[in-house]
Amino acid sequence: MGIVFWLRRFLWVFCIAFVVLVSVHLLRGQAPVYSLKESLLWAMISTCVFIATRIYRSRKGQHCVLCNDVPASK
């Protein structure tokens, strides 16, 4: 799994987290600018933690079937 795989995974997780967080903030009645700022911050933090954890576990040989990061068998 190369850098392209992890970049795609990062963007995918970031987009999902951002949309969910913005939606929750807006549904709670927060101002749109505040919602965007907070969502960007927390989506970035949560995505970095997720990706760092997945890279660490992948290097240890612990692959996640749900994340679809199981290497192709030979």
Image (tube, rainbow, N blue to C red):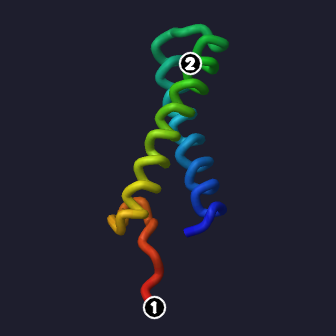
The local crowd at label 1, few if under 14, some if 14 to 19, many if 20 or more residues have their Cα within 10 Å, is few
The local crowd at label 2, few if under 14, some if 14 to 19, many if 20 or more residues have their Cα within 10 Å, is some
Q: Residue at x 51, y 40 (%)?
A: 47
Q: Does 46 sit left or right of 33 as displayed? A: left
Q: Nearer the viewer, residue 15 or 42?
A: 42
Kind of residue at badge 2: Glu
Please say if 47 is above or below 23. Answer: below
Q: Residue at x 49, y 18 (%)?
A: 27
* Mark 2, secondary structure of its residue: helix
Q: Quadrant of the C terminus?
A: bottom left
Disc assigned to residue 47: none
Disc assigned to residue 38: 2
Please say if 45 is above or below 55. Answer: above
Q: Nearer the viewer, residue 60 or 14?
A: 60
Q: Is residue 65 visible?
A: no
Q: Nearer the viewer, residue 27 or 73?
A: 73
Sequence-wise, the earlier of marks 1 and 2 is 2
Q: Residue at x 56, y 18 (%)?
A: 38
Residue 70 on image: x %, y %: 42, 72
The residue sitting at the left extreme is 62
- Rounded to the nearest angstrom, the CA distance separating label 1 from label 2 is 44 Å
Kind of residue at badge 1: Lys
Residue 22 on image: x %, y %: 55, 25
Q: Is residue 72 visible?
A: yes
Disc assigned to residue 74: 1
